[in-house]
Amino acid sequence: MKRLLGLILVVAGVLYPFAVYFGLGHLSPRQFALLLGGLWIARTLSDWRKPGSLWMAGLALVFCLTLGLVDEPALLRWYPVLLNAMLLAVFGLSLKFGTPLVERLARLSEPDLSDAGVRYTRRVTQVWVGFFLANGLVVTALNLWAPLSWWTLYTGLIAYVLIGLLFAGEWLVRQRVRRYA
């Protein structure tokens, strides 16, 4: 059940920009708020022990409550900015407090990470921080100055292509770093 809910949340997240673009004529912002809030509540109830789950869900639910109360369609476009800000905080705070997030993920498959691996994963975490900052700024600019179609294209396609390219580029660099380590 947890995996199914996780899959539903990922699909809902990927389809969100298209739901906003095509759904505004059929659903009010209040209805979007109810659907989005319901997904966040379900996610939190199924995986509340995961680090960051409660504060992230709290922020998302405040957004949904605001969206529901204000009932302003333009507010729907700010949800990806919120997600980028939350991911920026998760990655950024992991650099300041505790173990960097990418190092934690790397240690799942390689518990005895070398000193070079620790430095590398710290650098990769910094790259993700930069990505989420830049991506959030682009989406903010699109919210302020671009038509909905541009926002939908960027948040629904281009941003995911950029994420994929960053993953692929990091994987290629990691293979090279491992070869010379």
Image (spheres, rainbow, N blue to C red):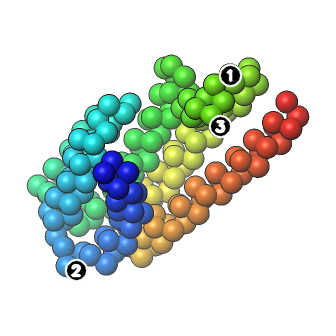
Badge 1 marks a residue whose secondary structure is loop
Quick check: marks 1 and 3 in contact, CB under 8 Å?
A: no
Image coordinates for residue 64, horizontal then vertical, percent:
20, 52
Q: Which residue, given by chain and number where applicable, does mark 2 sit on?
A: 25
Q: Residue at image x 31%, y 39%? A: 47
Residue type indicated by callout 2: Gly
Rendered image: mark on residue 98 = none
User: Going from the N terminus, do you reach mark 3 or mark 2 first?
Assistant: 2
User: Is 59 or 37 nearer to us in this picture?
Assistant: 37
For numbered disc 2, what is the local secondary structure? loop
- Residue at 58% from the left image edge and 55% from the top image edge: 163
What residue does disc 3 label?
A: 124
Give the foreground label among 1 and 3: 1
Q: Whole-percent x and y of residue 126?
A: 61, 35
Q: Image height check: is 125 above or below 62?
A: above
Q: Which residue is disc 1 drawn over? A: 112
The Cα–Cα distance between marks 3 and 2, rounded to whole angstroms, is: 41 Å
Q: Position of residue 15 (x, y in %)?
A: 38, 67
Label 1 or label 2, whichever lies nearer to me, is 1
Q: Is the residue 169 above or below the residue 111 in the image? A: below
Q: Amino acid at mark 1?
A: Asp
What's the residue type where badge 3 is placed?
Val
Q: Earlier in the sequence, mark 1 or mark 2?
A: 2
Residue at image position (11%, 55%) is 69
The answer to whether one can see residue 118 in this image is no
Residue 172 in the image: x percent, y percent? 76, 49
